[in-house]
Image: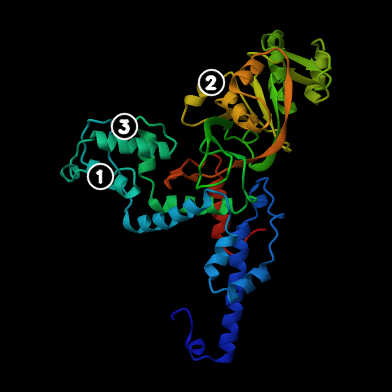
Amino acid sequence: QWLVGPALQAGEPPAVADFDVALSVAATRYVSNVYLGRINPRTVGFGLNVEPKRLDVPKRVRELTQSPHPEQVLASLEPRFPMYRPLKEGLLRYRQLAREVPRLRFGFPAKFTPGMSHKDVPALRKLLVALGDLRDVDPALAASELYDPALAEAVRRYQVRHGLGSDAIIGRNTLARLSTPIADRLKQIQLGLERLRWLPDVRGHYLIVNIPSFKLYGARTGEGPGSYDIEMNVVVGEAIDGRSTPVFHSDMTMVTFRPYWNVPEGIAAKELVPAILRNPKYLARNDMEIVSSFAPQAKPQAVSQAVLDQVAAGAYKIRQKPGTKNALGPIKFSFPNNNNVYLHGTPSQSLFSRDRRDFSHGCIRVQEPARLAEWVLADNGDWPLVRIEETMQGEATRTINLRKPIPVYILYSTVMADPDGAISFFEDIYGHDRTLQVLLARGFPYPR
């Protein structure tokens, strides 16, 4: 009753009227915010459009007042994205953890490895129990200062959840994550839920690329909390202006085997023209050619200062021929967008073994292009893995139009929910969390 004043408790008409108006306004805002999110994604530079998600807000508010189960009405407004529900459940759990788990500052040496001992090990053990990474602790070992095998396995699970590999060595990065306050993790979950509200209704066959986790995920049914039947490492755009991978949604429509790499104008002018001027053999060594257009029948131009000036001006183009040196690898997965971004293979496989993988100019390199092609082409006729690999290694460029477009969501979420409900956290490599947090902290009215 502390929410209302004495006048309302006494049933005075003006107080009741004011309360009714305030409650209606609050319900209207809540209905809109839970369905569309509080911030318009365009405000933060994301290529997601919430306008098609039309909602008759007054009608839903009336349903709330008339329904014997208003919680079901509100639940029907929540995103159907499979990750939303386990992430929402994680929010409740981390709120409790934020109240119960104090911030810990560990004093481990630079590389604390299994088998070593330290006075902070009992505190680490207690933290990992609270987070769910350490289970079935032997009571006799609870106060032990030994970094024992069971604790090492728990640290591995923790590292995997935070995109840190799984070597069980507590180095600088792992130590920094372990020392992060639970309250900060709670904020990440809140931001992740907000971003999921921006997405269109997700069902059936779809692909996700989550930039901060450097992972691609695919699902065929959209059922279950984050149940994916394909998953692989990716390389995304560098965390610098002009090279970061944009956030948007599109539909994959085609797969191209043995693609040409049509070099974007900016890369051609700023990077390749200077390289050619320094080394006249640069084009030949990299299987590249200058053409008047990207049309398949375009003929190569002889290199001259005048031709390079045309490239710098954007009139002539540079493309890389299919082959072992091609930057796109043997296959490209295309989905229409204004950013000239797509999924593709790469000859540079070593980058996939790194924990942090932001190295591209914006496009997304996939670690296992043949396996992804098998998944994408599963409904497109006779495309077994053997045939895919033969076509990738063939001589001809070939494009396959998908019979049914596959939705592709390029996401930016520093938090994800695993199928078992475990929450994974990742670094805010582009600083988008900071931007969104500032906007939300300003309160209503939110930028629309």
Nearer-the-camera pick, 223 or 23? 223
Quadrant location of the N terminus in the rendered image: bottom left
Q: Quadrant of residue 332?
A: top right
Nearer-the-camera pick, 230 or 289? 230
Q: Earlier in the sequence, mark 2 or mark 3?
A: 3
Asked if disc 2 and disc 3 are in contact, CB closer than 8 Å, the reply is no
Q: Secondary structure at mark 3?
A: loop
Is residue 363 visible in this depiction of the protein? Answer: no
Quadrant location of the C terminus in the rendered image: bottom right
Per the image, the residue denoted by label 3 is 110
In-image side of 274 versus 365 (left or right)? right
- Residue 349 circle label: 2
Q: Is residue 335 above or below residue 370?
A: below
Q: Residues within 10 Å of mark 3 (few under 14, many from 20)?
A: few
Nearer-the-camera pick, 136 or 43? 136
Q: Secondary structure at mark 2?
A: helix
Q: Residues within 10 Å of mark 1 (few under 14, many from 20)?
A: few
The structure's colour scheme is rainbow
Per the image, the residue denoted by label 1 is 136
Q: Quadrant of residue 25?
A: bottom right
Which residue is rendered at x = 53% and y = 34% of the image?
230
Q: Residues within 10 Å of mark 2 (few under 14, many from 20)?
A: few
Which residue is rendered at x = 18% and y = 46% of the image?
139
Residue type, mark 2 in image = Gln
x, y percentage for residue 224?
Answer: 51, 47
Residue type, mark 1 in image = Asp
Q: Earlier in the sequence, mark 3 or mark 1?
A: 3
Residue type, mark 3 in image = Ala
Question: Closer to us: mark 2 or mark 3?
Answer: 2
Which residue is rendered at x = 67% and y = 50% of the image?
42
